[in-house]
Amino acid sequence: MLIFSAFMIDSPRALIDVRERLAVALRQAVQQFQSSDPNVALSVTPCQDLRFGDYQSSAAMLIAKSTQQNPRELARLIINKLEVSDSCDKVEIAGPGFINFHLRSDFVSEQLSVISADPNTGARKVGTPTTIVIDFSSPNIAKSMHVGHIRSTFLGNALARITRAVGHHVITVNHLGDWGTQFGKLIYGYQHFLDKKMLAASPIAEFERLYKETNTLSEKDPNILQGVRQELVKLQSGDPENLRIWKEISIQSLQEFQQTYQRLDIRFDHELGESFYNPQLPHVVEELKKLGIARESEGAICIFFENDPALAKTAPMIIQKADGGFLYATTDLAAFRYRADQWKANQILYVTDARQQLHFKQLRTAATQWFCALNKPAPELQHIIFGSILGPDKKPIKTRSGEPIKLKDLLDEAESRAMKLVETKNPELTEAEKKQAARVIGLGALKYADLCQNRDLDYTFDWDKLLALQGNTAPYLIYAYVRIQSIFRKEDAKILGGKFQLGTPEETALGKHLIQFGDTLHAILKEYRPHLLTNYLYDLAVKFSKFYENCPVLKAEEPVRSSRLALCHLTARTLKKGLDLLGIETLEKM
RNA sequence: GCGCCCAUAGCUCAAUUGGAUAGAGCAUCUGACUACGGAUCAGAAGGUUGUAGGUUCAAAUCCUGCUGGGCGCACCA
């Protein structure tokens, strides 16, 4: 017995998915006295109210329902067969038949040691990695990025970081809007009204000006309108000069986008615009016709969904116009196939706003039929929807003149507002420190405000709330991190190793929360909801603050002091790692 | 007209997807050792989860009706 326990403590044990381990034990226990109904999912969840225990299961009540048994009696039977003594010191029945698990304190300590030694801070890798393509941001060439792009950009970036951290093979792609009828006006404007100085200073602003100018002139002057049409036709038929101008507009725009992405620390594995798929579009349409998936109707080539009850009554998906032109849907089908064939995608995530739900339902159905007809597996298409950003009037946010707010202006304002706060709260920082703090806090607050809400819903944008430094905000989390860093700046604060000792309620609560970081990341993979991570991190910061308030660290006696330092250290690492997965930086001072 | 979505404290949002006494922050009121950073912490108050039924041992969550709001519906993306 003595030897065994010494072995358990000394040997480095693996990271454990506590929830899954308890669920497995539970299923094994149930199987010993009855065949379980496969329709009943026997799961274990963290307790909402920690007075009941650490984890709970409603398995007994669920089984009792289908087998007409007494739930409490059944729970007793399950507990008798349950083998969880390595992680729990108490398992009890409560209420109508809940099974409550209480973790052993030494088990929690041991897990904390394992996580502390883990370079990935407890973010376990998935058992079977898959290839996930994430399509996000997708601004239009020759136009500024604006508020309409921020949710896609922030959500996509966070999801890419999270899925990568748990070991999936992730490919990020920026599906740029670089083709369309607006290029007729742009090229005409470029040829007649280009201001080279402005182009050099701010290319996109110049493109926007060219577009507007040509647009207003072509409304008044039929000759100009005719010219615009001609330029578009020339471009589409491959005229070298117009292609050169189009290419230049694309490159210049992309370079300007790049500055924004750099500022936000966002990278793409591929920047493939719609134009990239142009050569493939005729083949796609031909193939779909040949396979009997698409057919002609009123001059256009369409895909109908008679066999799909959810889509039967919807308008068909048009993949070629009566005039021979191709559409958004055609490009999406071509891109879908490209990602499947070239990148071997198992799953494709489209981070696009909720209004496009019908389009993506149709795309999923069409693509599935297509791949089925070709006898190859189709990647799983996931539409990661999000709501609109509303202004104080509860309508989609706009500038006073009714234009969309430019992303750059938003980022600038975030930083300048954060700078004002830093100057009032901590004037003794150096200028460089203030600037750095303003940047990290401003941009972090903006990203966090977006990510911390359930993405399905619209949300109300409010500067004061997102930069408010209390509550579920980036500044509050960063502040918790900064306080910890401040401890480690003291001369005598060194991490001495040693064991975690969870003596006080605050230490226990913090420790138990810290070991759930990995579980939280894995929970996000189910529905790709990053706000589960922000909720976790906010909880962590709150639990840390309570600990910090009640448990002196540096003044404590050994070995408690070392244990508390280690708790501080792991909390800081978890905060930093979690924020990093959301695309948010941390600070040493603020 | 057809279809999808939403409604939770005065405000902004949660609720581990059907679980136990629905939780936070703001705003309001009260308190905290000249503080390991007070950008913090403790407490009070605030709710018939839009409404009326139904299913269930258990409903904010599922089903039906109603009210109020958002969005999408053949050649835009």
Image (cartoon, coloured by chain):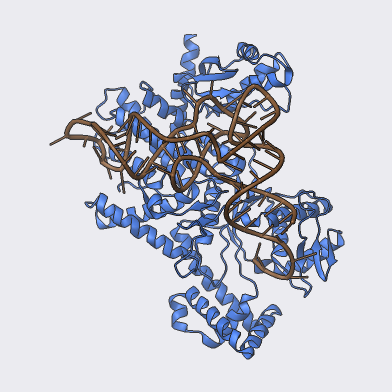
Chain colours: A blue, B brown
Hey, which quadrant is residue A62 in on the image?
A: top right
Rendered position, A221 above or below A293:
below
Q: Is residue A496 visible?
A: no
Q: At 70% across and 59% down in the image, what residue appears?
A: A338
**Residue toward you, B18 or A104:** B18
**Residue at the image point whose x is 40% and y is 47% from the top:** A474
Instruction: Find residue A271 and report its horizontal and vertical position in percent.
Output: 59, 63
Q: Residue at x 53, y 61 (%)?
A: A148
The answer to which of A441 and A375 lies nearer the viewer is A441
Q: Is residue A73 left or right of residue A101?
A: right
- Where residue A393 appears, as percent x and y from the top left, is 47, 58
User: Does A62 appear above or below A200?
Assistant: above
Q: Position of residue A4 (x, y in %)?
A: 50, 13
Farthest residue toward the bottom?
Answer: A223
Q: Residue at x 37, y 47 (%)?
A: A475
- Whether residue A263 is visible here, answered yes or no, is yes
